[in-house]
Image (cartoon, rainbow, N blue to C red):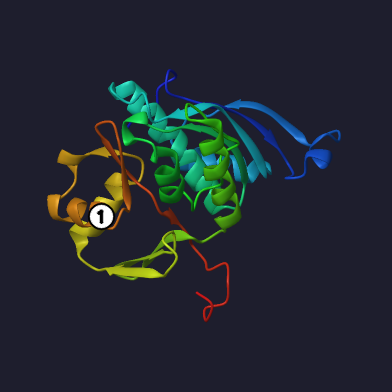
Amino acid sequence: MSPSSTLTPSAAVWRDYDPVACALPGMFLGDLALTGPVAEECDRLWELGARRVRLSGAVDLADTGTPDAAARAVRTLSLVRDLTARAVLVEWELRPDPAGGPTAAEDISRLLSHLQPPQRIEGVDPATADSALRTWRNGHYLGKCLWRQGPGFVQIRDRRWGDLRRFTVDEPHYQEAIGRLAYGATASAVPSDALADFREERLVLGVGAVEWWLPYRVSRWIQEAMTI
C-alpha cells in the first residue's frame, strides 16, 4: 500500500517512557507526521530517540468498508506492531468491530495481546472494555507472538493462547506471502494455500478487504535461548 496523506497518522513523541521524565526540558521530540513507509518511519523514530509514542486517532475496526478506511487501520496497527517490537511505549486507541458480537472486545484483545495494550477500547460497554483491557495489560509481554528470518526459513512463535505454538516455514511462497501481508494485502495477492494456513492459525487479521500479518519481526532474541 502506498502511503497517503489522508491515511497518515501523526504522533507525539518523547525520549522516555516515564511521564515525569517526559515533562523535563528536551524530552519532547515534537508532533511528527509519519508520511513514509511504516518500517522506515519506525526506524526514524528509534534513531531520533523515541521511547514513548502517542498515535493520533483510533484504530477503527468498525469502519473498514472502504479501501481508505481499511488502509488507515492497517497502517496504524502496523505502527503499533513495529514499535512494540522495539519495546517502544505506544499509546493508541482501539474500536472493535461490533459485528463480532458481545465478545468482540475480548476476542480482538486476545488476538492482539502481543501488541502494546491500547489506552482505551471504544464503542463497547465500559465494563466489558475495562475487563478486556485489564486482561490485556496483565498478560502482555514482549515476544508473545513473533517471527524471525533464518537462512532459508522463517520461524514463528506464538504464545497468545497460553501455550507455545511454533511454526517453521521453509516453502519460498509462504515466505513471499509473509512479505506481502506484512503491511497489508488483498487475499488475491497472496498464495491461497499460505493464506488459508495463516488464517487457520490466526496469524492474520482481516481488516475490511485487507489481510494483515499479526506477528512482529525480531532480529535478536530478548531472552536466553533456553527460555525461548
Work out whether 145 lies above or below 72.
below
Q: Position of residue 9 (x, y in %)?
A: 51, 26
Q: Is residue 43 visible?
A: no
Element on which disc 1 rests: helix
- Left or right: where 155 falls relative to 171: right
Residue drawn at x 38%, y 31% as measured from the top left: 61
Q: Position of residue 50 (x, y in %)?
A: 66, 42
Q: Is residue 48 visible?
A: yes
Q: Residues within 10 Å of mark 1 (few under 14, many from 20)?
A: some
- The residue sitting at the top extreme is 6
Work out whether 99 lies above or below 78.
above
Residue drawn at x 75%, y 32% as measured from the top left: 28
- Left or right: where 225 falls relative to 170: right
- The residue sitting at the right extreme is 24
Amino acid under disc 1: Phe
Instruction: Specify the quadrant of the image occupied by residue 170.
Output: bottom left
Residue nearer the viewer, 184 or 38? 184
Q: Position of residue 36 (x, y in %)?
A: 46, 31
Work out whether 159 lies above or below 3.
below
Residue on which disc 1 sits: 198
Q: Position of residue 151 (x, y in %)?
A: 34, 71
Work out whether 6 lies above or below 45.
above
Instruction: Specify the quadrant of the image occupied by residue 3.
Output: top left
Residue drawn at x 51%, y 48% as measured from the top left: 115
Which quadrant: the N terminus?
top left
Instruction: Specify the quadrant of the image occupied by residue 167.
Output: bottom left
